[in-house]
């Protein structure tokens, strides 16, 4: 599950705190499909946002630059850097001053101009920059309905269409429950 925090452009530390208060973590991305989804989500629900904090950090340890997801304390197994970096000279971006934070951005310098793209790529930046944030948390297993749902024992209270479920004693469905079953 993803929650966009766009009304409070904040530092990474503040964004991380807001995510933890809501039971999640700052955004971490493990695949191209997920990066595409997040980029599409941002462009469709908040097109004016150009920077988003993530849980990613660049740190220096044992004379090596490492890219890690902070809350998991694991190395990144997927990255999506701005493709115009000259990897033959620099490889993935290295932290000039550590720690630096991985930030999703869609505005880049390109051929001496500022270009705004329809896609969010990764870059390293200062952790105290003001940016939006996305919180991510695992979805809860709320059980599964089989057949007409008579045997359901989960905790879902939202229908497949996103509407709140009605209780068995709700006056809007009593007439349906009072009808005899069809043969």
Image (spheres, grey):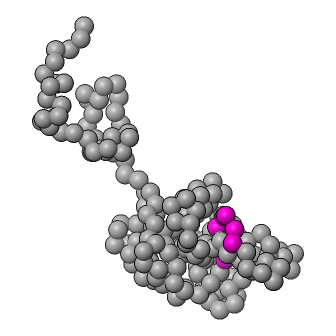
**Count of numbered labels shown in the rendering:** 0
- Name the residue located 18 percent from the left edge and 31 percent from the top edge: 173
Residue 166's place in the image compared with 67, above or below, is above
Horizontal placement of 182 versus 80: left or right? left
Q: Quadrant of residue 69?
A: bottom right
In the image, the segment drawn in magenta is 116-123
Q: Residue furthest bottom?
A: 97
Q: Quadrant of residue 84?
A: bottom right
Compare residues 24 and 6 and report the one nearer the observer: 6
Question: Residue 179's x, y, as percent?
Answer: 16, 18
Q: Residue furthest right?
A: 88
- Name the residue located 79 percent from the left edge and 77 percent from the top edge: 110
Compare residues 104 and 31 and report the one nearer the observer: 104
In which quadrant of the rendered image does the C terminus lie? top left
- Assign the magenta stretch its main secondary structure: strand
Q: Quadrant of residue 157?
A: top left
Residue 99 in sight: no
Horizontal placement of 137 versus 179: left or right? right
Question: Residue 17's x, y, as percent?
Answer: 39, 78
- Name the residue located 40 percent from the left edge and 71 percent from the top edge: 19
Residue 36 in sight: yes
In which quadrant of the rendered image does the N terminus lie? bottom left
Question: Residue 24's x, y, as percent?
Answer: 40, 66
Question: Residue 48's x, y, as percent?
Answer: 56, 71
Magenta segment: does it hold 47? no
Compare residues 152 and 171 and report the one nearer the observer: 171
Horizontal placement of 156 versus 50: left or right? left
């Amino acid at each position: 599950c993803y929650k966009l925090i766009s009304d409070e452009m904040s530092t990474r530390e503040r964004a991380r705190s807001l995510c933890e208060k809501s039971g999640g973590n700052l955004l971490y991305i493990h695949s191209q499909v997920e990066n595409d989804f997040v980029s599409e989500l941002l462009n469709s629900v908040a097109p004016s946002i150009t920077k988003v904090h993530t849980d990613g950090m660049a740190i220096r340890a044992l004379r090596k630059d490492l890219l890690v997801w902070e809350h998991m304390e694991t190395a990144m197994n997927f990255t999506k850097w701005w493709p115009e970096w000259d990897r033959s000279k620099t490889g993935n971006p290295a932290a000039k001053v550590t720690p630096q934070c991985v930030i999703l951005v869609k505005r880049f310098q390109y051929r001496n101009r500022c270009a705004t793209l329809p896609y969010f790529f990764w870059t390293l930046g200062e952790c105290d920059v003001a940016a939006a944030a996305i919180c991510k948390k695992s979805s809860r297993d709320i059980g599964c309905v089989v057949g007409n749902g008579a045997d359901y024992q989960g905790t879902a209270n939202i229908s497949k269409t996103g509407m709140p479920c009605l209780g068995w004693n709700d006056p809007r469905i009593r007439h349906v429950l009072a009808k005899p079953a069809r043969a």
